[in-house]
Amino acid sequence: MRICFVSRRYWPAVSGMSVYAEKLLTELTARGHEVVLVSQFRGDPAGSAVYGGGPPPADRVPAGVRAVGLEALGEQRVADGLPADFGADVATMRDTVLRLHGEEPFDLLHAQYAWPTGEAVLQASAQLGLPSVVSVQGGDGHWVGLCCPEHSAGIRTVLDRAGAVLIGSRTFADEVVEHHGTDPSRFTLVGGATDTAAFTPADDDRVGLLPGDRPATLLFHGRVDRRKGVLDLLHALAALRAGGRDVRLLVSGIGPDVTAVADLVAELGLDDAVEQRGYVPYDAAPAVYREGDVFVSPTQSEGFSNTILEAMAAGLPVVTTRTVGVVDCVRDGENGLLHDVGDVAGLTAALGRLLDEPDLGPRLARRALAEVREVWSWPALTGRIEAVYDRLAGTAPDTSWTTLEPGSRHTSAGRGVEPVEPAGGCRFLSAPHLL
């Protein structure tokens, strides 16, 4: 099958989407599919600072995959003080897919992220008569469409009209249904995956054990964003140290709140206890996990957390939140510890338990390690996605929506949260990187 895979982010962008796309495309080509990757990227200084900017690098594109980078020029208007023009970027993505299809026809179009990439693929699908698949993976389900009526109409159209909608977890699907009134039967649950060959314990005999000869190291790895709970973690660290526990924190990654982290570290007097590692290439990530003793992810919500799966595969006990996209793979007291979102006291208490109960970490980590190796593998996930491709192959897309006004293109009218245009306009027009 010849597949056009349209992604919102790919390397060098530091994002779970980049990991997902690389691993999925590697598996698809290994199974004999031909894949063309079309990926947006930020080329401006502001966008590059948040994600890492530039087109897909040749050394990160799987063998056999053709990569086409599209600079998000409409989105980058914010650098000139103008609102982002997502419509222009959607048109560029759509027209690129049409051009590439003209060079050599595709059999199926797959959008990674429901909006704006999903809208571009939906438009191209209608024009070409090809089936479409859309993966909902994070902010597209948590926030897009609650921001303003225009984006609500756009994402609801994608969710209701794409040939198939893939999503990582039941709780995430439930959240999207609550937001947009989408028919639950529209979602195909595919789960998440991690590379259990690359992410392995530092020492199989010491999985989950804390060191006895140095302070324990808490690890936060991923997008440095307050929505991932990194600021809550700093407050918890301060509380632990004030209580006499000798513990340090490694913050690994980049994101919109790198400066906010540095400022709060100084404010809380944690300079000697916190290291901000900055950008870490994906190939170096397994080594970073081996530097940690406990993985901490106080995230507000996830589609499905790649970093939690990576930490499990690395043999670290996991402390995270009782929230969407997390509770589908972490069970409190069984393979990790959970606390409520924003509950710094609860986070502090959970970390204190691991520090004070030497048998707890190994018990949690060993069970998590066994589960991630058995359930959350890339071959298993790719097989589930490939089955969707096979089901859609040769089918005609729904094009009825193309003759309707934007507000009536979706089928979930009157259900879900109805967005109201906020004072000052849609926040994503001024801060598109929040998508």
Image: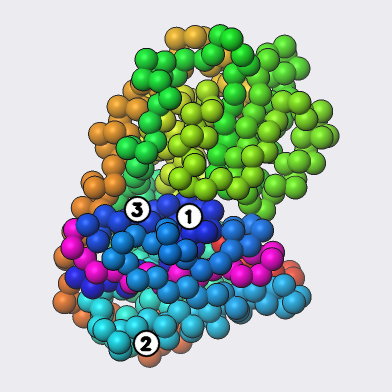
Q: Answer with the quarter of the image where residue 426 lies.
A: bottom right
Nearer mark to the viewer, of 1 and 3: 3
**Residue indicated by mark 2:** 99
Of residue 126 and residue 343, the one placed in the foreground of this image is: 126
Give the CA distance from mark 1 to mark 3: 17 Å
Q: Amino acid at mark 2?
A: Arg
- Residue at horizontal 19%, vertical 58%? 31
Q: Answer with the quarter of the image where residue 96 lies.
A: bottom left
Sequence order check: which comes first, mark 1 or mark 3?
3
Q: Position of residue 395 (x, y in %)?
A: 18, 77
- Residue at horizontal 62%, vertical 32%? 250
Give the CA distance from mark 1 to mark 2: 29 Å
Location of residue 392 with respect to 174 vertically, above or below: below
Give the CA distance from mark 3 to mark 2: 26 Å
Q: Is residue 342 visible?
A: no
Task: Based on the picture, tell me whether residue 33 belongs to the magenta stretch.
Answer: yes
Per the image, label 1 sits on a secondary structure element best described as: loop
Q: Which residues are magenta?
A: 31-47
- Residue at horizontal 30%, vertical 84%? 101
Per the image, label 3 sits on a secondary structure element best described as: helix
**Residue indicated by mark 3:** 23
Q: Position of residue 418 (x, y in %)?
A: 54, 66
Q: Which mark is residue 138?
A: 1
For mark 2, does the 10 Å Cα neighbourhood hold few (<14), some (14 to 19), or many (20 or more) residues? few
- Residue at horizontal 35%, vertical 27%? 369
